[in-house]
């Protein structure tokens, strides 16, 4: 299937590849738009990377309204690796990227799945440095899906090596699987998920399997109550945040955070309903620009 025009325009929108060092580890990120604007930092899920957002970010930038940065958390994408991975490391990386990208003022952090837990932790521990967080289908109260799969031993062991890029792309899968994907998005994301494995053309996945060695999502319940900045929750219709989990998160956030369902979306909405995701985010951001946050308990 040929990619539609909007997608082709998005992935060819000029951007910069940047790197900032955080606690001795190089952290790679992509930046769209000029510095000196209000900003968004996009945070991927487990085993994913910044290019999962490459067709979304340009549509959020507007007419240079925002500086948009998509981070490769350490252990992912083109960033360096650590001996151990902690939420505090990733929070520091998100904030360092916002500073290095030249974002004017506190950024809005938008996180998907595991990245939603990173966003929650950043909003809880550094609320004075964050304008707001948007959490996309992060199932607080449970393991994130990548952690669960790693613990079962079904996925995320030592990355497999494939003889060539096309073979690897044909084996690309998400955790969890979902009923629908846009094939042109999957092909693009898969091709940016690979690194050379040798001099013979072989390739393997970029992520570090040690990322999944420690549970991080279990503290998110307590952290939710400590978030002092604006919050919104996007729940995929066929995702992991069930209506009862959404209601639970709404209560923990003081009944003032909107919970918005993305219709027809699986857990990875940038892969199956990207335009719905973009519309929801742009609508939310436009509202936040012209409204005042309700106080907790108000």
Image (spheres, rainbow, N blue to C red):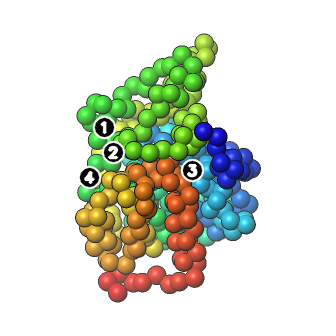
The location of residue 101, given as percent across then percent down, is: 65, 56
Label 1–label 2 contact, CB within 8 A: yes
* Alpha carbon distance from label 3 to label 4: 25 Å
- Is residue 37 shown above or below 48? below
Give coordinates of residue 121: x percent, y percent: 39, 59
Residue at screen point 33% across, 48% down: 144
Q: Is residue 10 above or below residue 192?
A: below
Q: Secondary structure at mark 1?
A: helix
Quadrant location, the N terminus = top right
Residue drawn at the location 39% of the way across and 84% of the way down:
295
Kindly identify which numbered label has been placed on residue 142: 4
Q: Position of residue 190 (x, y in %)?
A: 54, 35
If the image is split into quadrants, where does the C terminus sit? bottom left
Residue at x 40% of width, y 73% of height? 258
How far apart marks 3 and 1 lie (CA) works out to 23 Å
Q: Earlier in the sequence, mark 3 or mark 1?
A: 3
> To which residue does mark 1 refer?
149
Task: Give the mark nearest the N terminus, 1 or 4.
Answer: 4
């Amino acid at each position: 299937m040929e990619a539609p025009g909007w997608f082709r325009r998005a992935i060819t929108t000029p951007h910069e590849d940047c790197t900032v060092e955080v606690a001795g580890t190089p952290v790679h990120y992509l930046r769209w738009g000029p510095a000196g604007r209000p900003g968004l930092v996009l945070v991927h899920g487990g085993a994913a990377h910044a290019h999962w957002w490459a067709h979304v970010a340009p549509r959020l930038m507007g007419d240079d309204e925002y500086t948009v940065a998509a981070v490769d958390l350490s252990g992912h994408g083109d960033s360096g690796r650590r001996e151990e991975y902690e939420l505090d490391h990733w929070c520091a990386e998100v904030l360092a990227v916002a500073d290095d990208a030249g974002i004017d003022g506190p950024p809005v952090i938008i996180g998907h799945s595991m990245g939603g837990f990173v966003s929650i932790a950043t909003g809880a521990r550094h609320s004075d440095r964050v304008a707001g967080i948007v959490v996309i289908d992060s199932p607080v109260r449970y393991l994130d899906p990548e952690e669960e799969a790693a613990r079962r031993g079904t996925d995320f062991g030592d990355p497999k090596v494939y003889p060539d890029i096309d073979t690897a792309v044909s084996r690309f899968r998400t955790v969890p699987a979902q009923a629908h994907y846009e094939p042109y998005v999957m092909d693009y994301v898969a091709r940016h998920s690979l690194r050379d494995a040798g001099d013979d053309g072989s390739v393997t996945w970029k992520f570090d399997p040690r990322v999944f060695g420690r549970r991080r999502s279990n503290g998110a319940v307590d952290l939710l109550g400590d978030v002092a900045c604006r919050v919104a929750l996007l729940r995929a219709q066929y995702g992991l945040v069930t209506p009862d989990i959404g209601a639970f998160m709404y209560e923990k956030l003081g009944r003032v955070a909107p919970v918005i369902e993305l219709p027809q979306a699986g857990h990875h909405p940038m892969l199956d309903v990207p335009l719905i995701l973009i519309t929801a985010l742009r609508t939310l951001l436009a509202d936040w620009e012209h409204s005042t946050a309700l106080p907790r308990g108000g």
